[in-house]
Amino acid sequence: MSRRLGGAYVAALLLLLSLPILVVAGVSLNGGQSLRFPPEDLSVRWYGELFRAADWTGPLRNSVVIAALASLMAVAVALPLALHAWGRGGWLTRVLTVLGVAPFMLPPVITALGFLVFWVSLGLYGRMAATVLSHGIFLVTLPLVTISLGLAAIDRSLLEAARTMGASRGQVLRTVVLPLVVPYVLSGYAFAFVLSLNEYIIAYMVAGFTVETLPIKIFNSLRYGYTPIMGVVSVLFVAVAALVFGLIGAFGNLPRLMGSERAEGR
């Protein structure tokens, strides 16, 4: 009896969590320019409209470019910081690590307000570069955590064996350490990319409507009426996130990336 109740509870919880996604997916299939659920006059024409309409392709391109560059910046900052913290430690490294995690610990509005004041004072408000740099700084926590987990999983005996065979510190880094943490670097990049793609508050605060991303475009479009293309964008976000997490689960060590101490190697 208790097992049946547990199964029913899990099923109800899954339905509750997936209901918004199902509604949005249904809305995207309306044939007319309306947000109705259940959808009327089923059609997939709005999926093609996302890639044809100039007022949507621009924000789509901006979102992808910003997410790609910001994630690359986040990894470029996180990798040497994680390597230094793992290899040497010390109070300076701990301070830098705390600073790397700090933007993610603060409410996004507070972080966005700080970025806003900073870029306005430099005269760079409304530039794509400001959005890229702001996202890169804000998201550095994700690759920092994943790379640190990867480094912590390395067997120190491998390093000792390499040194015993005459390898220098640089050779150990290139031939042993980096190949082992590559999956964690890619996972950190993927996490940062998905979050940057969906981020709204910081992007809006540092650029307003000057640099439109897809989340900003959705908000801006609400002033002029509702169209199923908003549902299409939401489905796109969910699909990208599901694809990224699916790939990480298939080729990486997802349990360990999510903080499990008993993750099994694949």
Image: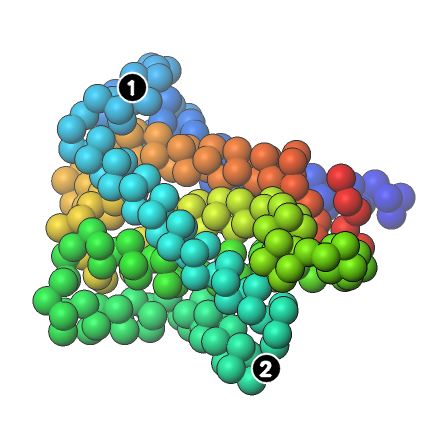
Would residue 241 be found to the left or right of residue 125 on screen?
right
Q: What element carries label 1?
A: helix
Type of colouring: rainbow
> From the image, which quarter does the C terminus lie in?
top right
Amino acid type at circle 2 is Gly
> From the image, which quarter does the N terminus lie in?
top right
| Rendered residue at 33%/73% (across/down) | 110
Q: Is mark 2 on a helix, strand or loop?
A: loop
Q: Is residue 179 above or below residue 32?
A: below
Q: Quadrant of residue 17?
A: top right
Q: Which of marks 2 and 1 is in front?
A: 2
Residue 38 rendering spot, x and y as whole percentages: 41, 26
* Residue assigned mark 2: 90
Residue 180 rendering spot, x and y as whole percentages: 66, 48
Amino acid type at circle 1 is Gly
Q: Residue furthest front?
A: 166
Q: Disc 2 and disc 1: Cα gap in Å? A: 54 Å
Q: Tell me, yes or no, whether the two marked residues, 2 and 1, touch with CB atoms within 8 Å.
A: no
Q: Which residue lies furthest to the left in this view?
A: 123
Q: Which mark is residue 246?
A: none
| Rendered residue at 41%/38% (across/down) | 237
Query: Observer-nearest residue: 108 or 247?
Result: 247
Q: Which of marks 2 and 1 is nearer the N terminus?
A: 1
Q: Is residue 9 above or below residue 169?
A: above
* Residue assigned mark 1: 48
